[in-house]
Image (tube, rainbow, N blue to C red):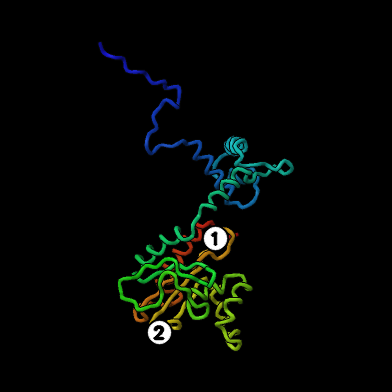
Amino acid sequence: MNKETPKTDRSDPESEEPKKGFGVQSVEVGMHLLKVLMEFGRPAMLKELAEAADMSAQKAHRYLVSLQRSGMVEQDVAGGRYGLGEFALNVGLTALSQLNIVHIAGDAVAELRNRTDQSCLLAVWGSHGPTIVRMSEGSRPLVTTARVGVVLSMVNSATGRVFAAFLPKDTADEFLAPELPLEDRESYNALLADVRIRGISRTEGEEQATINALAAPLFDHFGNIAGALTLLGQEKHFNVDWDGPLTRELLAVSKSVSNRLGYNANG
């Protein structure tokens, strides 16, 4: 006697086996609306959100009601504007606490090396100054003292100049004082001003003869410098032009890493 195969209750969504690659459309729509609200960077009116999300005001309102109930959105009773709720803020803070600059930017070191075939390093701010924590060498042999654990010069290295340009002035000055003679302060400050404008620094044989370098800052969600990505290579094979291909690659990768760290260039 054949056993009867149990029937699936199609009216119960929990009884259906999930299909790989399928999602819940209503959740995706709600998340799209939430992303639009986040991109406003301020509480917004229903009409503004609906237009930006490309949906009717009636539809947007239904989703906002559900998002309010979940704590992802809250509404200003006086003005009727919608802003991020307490739960959304807690989710954001939890995500930020899980970010690891070395892990995220460490992957970028290998990516940048592959894209440029130049040696690449990641430095973070340590107790003694800018310290190399990741390094990946290009295909061309490079005679350099740079290696993991080395503290770089604040004055003569491209990496150090990036930190000097974007660290709080008091912190930078404390570490610059032992390296920088008083008579060189004015010209060095002008150099740092240029680094801030360009968002990148360069050296041409200043720290080590025949080696050029380009360095770019990595910013966290507070807009503080969290690290620096640096390309370095043999002078004859390393183009340090401000609009050169190495500069473009470095800026693109450093911007991507900063975005992953929660940085918003628009504030």
The residue drawn where x is 46% and y is 61% is: 102
Q: Earlier in the sequence, mark 2 or mark 1?
A: 2
Residue type at mark 2 is Ala
Task: Read off the residue under disc 1.
Answer: 220
Asked if 76 appears above or below 112 in the picture, the reply is above
Q: Amino acid at mark 1?
A: Asp
Question: Closer to the camera, 138 or 30?
Answer: 138
Which of these two is toward me, 167 or 72?
167
Q: CA distance from mark 2 to mark 1?
A: 33 Å
Residue 168 is situated, as x and y percent measured from the top left of the image, at: 61, 70
Q: Position of residue 176 (x, y in %)?
A: 57, 79
Q: Quadrant of the C terminus?
A: bottom right
Looking at the rendered structure, the secondary structure element under dot 1 is: loop
Secondary-structure class at tag 2? loop
Quadrant of the rendered image containing residue 231: bottom left
x 40%, y 64%: residue: 109
Q: Neighbour class for label 1 at 10 Å: few (<14), some, many (≥20)?
A: many
Instruction: Name the residue carrying label 2.
Output: 209
Answer with left or right where residue 87 lies relative to residue 146: right
Q: Is residue 44 left or right of residue 227?
A: right
Q: Quadrant of residue 111?
A: bottom left
**Spot occupied by residue 161 in the image (x, y as percentages of width and height):** 52, 76
Residue 153 visible in image:
yes
The mark found on residue 1 in the picture is none
State the image coordinates of residue 226 (x, y, percent, origin top left).
Answer: 53, 64
